[in-house]
Image (cartoon, rainbow, N blue to C red):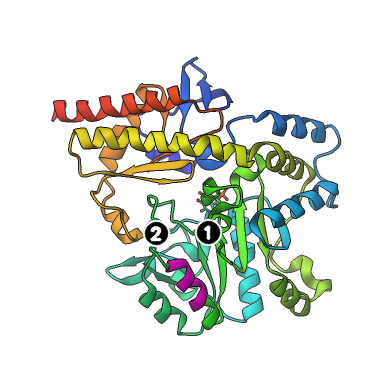
């Protein structure tokens, strides 16, 4: 886990076991988990229905390189939730994005993709591009890119429609890959009318629209897409849909399916650069079926979204009490505080407010009070087993950390 080098504190926590919204470390300390595997465990740890389905499937075989009945059920349920009729399986959200991008390039015959500044879509080569002083450059820290990613990718700021239009006007963009709300550089909501314009402009310029719901599935059972009636050509999601068991899926419209059939040579498709031997394995499918049927249900959101609201209000009250120039943003069952006075409109603005030392301090204070926040951001995700008392425990820890910050300075 390469990111552990940025861990707050002198040693990592080694986990013994987790259940619901809590885990215990090998030293026997119990933690409230607001990181939740950074969304892989949004369902809570070891959800009962998923555990039972995985155990039952393990006894019947892990992987066959053949479909089973769960595949039919899962595809049907994904269609019902997200409104796209056809689905493919991968082992991670990263792979789902990689495969969706390949299909987009293949179908449009165009070479480039477009992403928003400071996006994160997994370790997808094409996405490691940021704007530096307004110029697209390989993102600092990008390890061993095969080609300069500015050759493969156009990048504009989120919510910047003139820049989006100008970038698409080159006519070489196969697809826009976007989270419908940015979540990996703070929560950045789309401005009014942004999604309508994004859809109109992509259609006008012949680019496909891929929405990545891997984190924004915190907004509802059909993600932000369904909550807000968005109409992507493709949709990708992974992490919590298997209750934490590795899986990624990508869905596409009937129109795209038709184009694929006429553009993909079936006798060569196994070397086409998408898919994988374990993609669609029986274990992942059993996990997804049980999770979608019994865990990641409308009831989960009815329970968790009000708790995220309680988290937001608790933190806001402390911020107001100390007159701090900080904000809290909420998206469904996810909330995050950020060290700037106004909500950022885009990734560039959000990154300018990063204070790594303060981040580390807040994380360490939380850890010392038995609470794990999502590393690098100050993000909290609420599981169905999280309680009001858990949320208030965080508010109390947050209040103490802030008070101590000013006492000590
Ligand atoms: C929006 C988004 N998409 C895709 C991914 C990649 O997920 P994974 O690392 O499970 O492949 C992430 C990971 O954080 C993500 O935040």
Residue at mark 2: 118
Q: Quadrant of the C terminus?
A: top left
Residue at mark 1: 228
Question: In which quadrant of the rendered view does residue 159 lie?
Answer: bottom left
The answer to whether residue 4 is left or right of residue 108 is left
Vertical comparison of 114 with 123: above or below: below
Residue at image location 27% in from the left, 34% down from the top = 317
Residue 316 or 367: which is nearer the viewer? Answer: 316
- The secondary element bearing badge 2 is classed as loop
Residue at image location 46% in from the left, 42% down from the top = 334
Residue 123, given in percent of the width and then of the height, sits at: 52, 55
Residue 269 or 23: which is nearer the viewer? Answer: 23
Question: In which quadrant of the rendered view does residue 130 lie?
Answer: bottom left
Structural crowding at the residue carrying mark 1, measured as other residues with C-alpha within 10 Å and reported as few (<14), some (14–19) or many (≥20): few
The numbered mark at residue 124 is: none
Residue 92 or 69: which is nearer the viewer? Answer: 69
Between the residue at mark 1 and the residue at mark 2, the CA separation in whole angstroms equals 23 Å
Instruction: Tell me if I can see residue 9 in this picture.
Output: no
Residue 192, given in percent of the width and then of the height, sits at: 39, 64
Query: Does the magenta portion include 199?
Result: yes
Residue 251, given in percent of the width and then of the height, sits at: 67, 61
Comes first in the chain, label 1 or label 2: 2
Residue at image location 43% in from the left, 56% down from the top = 182
Disc 1 beta carbon < 8 A from ligand 1?
A: no
Q: Which residues are magenta?
A: 194-201
User: Among all residues in the image, which is located at the extreme top?
Assistant: 28
Q: Main secondary structure of the magenta part?
A: helix
- The secondary element bearing badge 1 is classed as loop
Residue 53, given in percent of the width and then of the height, sits at: 77, 34
The answer to whether residue 218 is left or right of residue 248 is left
Structural crowding at the residue carrying mark 2, measured as other residues with C-alpha within 10 Å and reported as few (<14), some (14–19) or many (≥20): many
Residue at image location 50% in from the left, 85% down from the top = 171
């Amino acid at each position: 886990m390469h990111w552990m080098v940025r861990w707050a504190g002198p040693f990592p926590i080694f986990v013994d076991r987790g259940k619901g919204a809590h885990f215990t470390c090998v030293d026997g300390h119990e933690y409230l988990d607001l990181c939740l595997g950074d969304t892989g465990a949004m369902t809570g740890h070891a959800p009962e229905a998923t555990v039972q389905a995985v155990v039952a499937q393990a006894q019947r075989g892990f992987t066959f390189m053949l479909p089973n009945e769960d595949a039919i059920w899962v595809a049907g349920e994904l269609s019902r939730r997200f409104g796209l009729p056809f689905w493919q399986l991968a082992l991670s959200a990263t792979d789902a994005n990689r495969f969706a991008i390949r299909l987009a390039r293949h179908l449009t015959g165009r070479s480039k993709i477009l992403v928003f500044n400071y996006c994160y879509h997994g370790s997808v080569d094409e996405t490691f591009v940021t704007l530096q002083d307004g110029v697209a450059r390989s993102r600092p820290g990008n390890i061993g890119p095969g080609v300069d990613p500015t050759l493969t990718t156009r990048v504009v700021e989120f919510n910047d429609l003139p820049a989006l239009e100008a970038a698409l006007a080159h006519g070489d963009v196969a697809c826009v890959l976007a989270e419908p709300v940015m979540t990996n550089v703070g929560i950045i909501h789309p401005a009014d009318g942004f999604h309508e314009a994004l859809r109109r402009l992509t259609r006008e310029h012949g680019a496909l629209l891929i929405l990545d719901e891997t984190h924004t599935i915190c907004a509802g059972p059909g993600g932000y897409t369904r909550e807000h009636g968005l109409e992507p050509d493709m949709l990708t999601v992974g992490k919590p849909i298997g209750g934490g068991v590795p899986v990624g899926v990508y869905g596409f419209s009937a129109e795209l399916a038709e184009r694929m059939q006429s553009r993909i040579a079936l006798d060569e498709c196994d070397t086409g650069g998408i898919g994988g031997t374990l993609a669609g394995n029986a274990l992942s499918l059993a996990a997804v079926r049980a999770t979608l049927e019994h865990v990641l249900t409308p009831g989960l959101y009815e329970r968790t979204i009000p708790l995220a609201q309680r988290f937001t209000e608790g933190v806001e009250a402390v911020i107001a009490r100390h007159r701090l120039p900080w904000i809290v943003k909420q998206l469904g069952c996810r909330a995050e505080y950020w060290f700037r006075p106004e909500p950022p409109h885009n990734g560039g603005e959000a990154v300018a407010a990063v204070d790594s030392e303060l981040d580390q301090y807040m994380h360490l204070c939380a850890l010392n009070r038995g609470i794990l926040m999502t590393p690098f951001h100050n993000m909290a995700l609420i599981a169905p087993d999280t309680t009001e008392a858990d949320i208030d425990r965080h508010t109390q820890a947050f209040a103490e950390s802030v008070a101590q910050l000013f006492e000590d300075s």
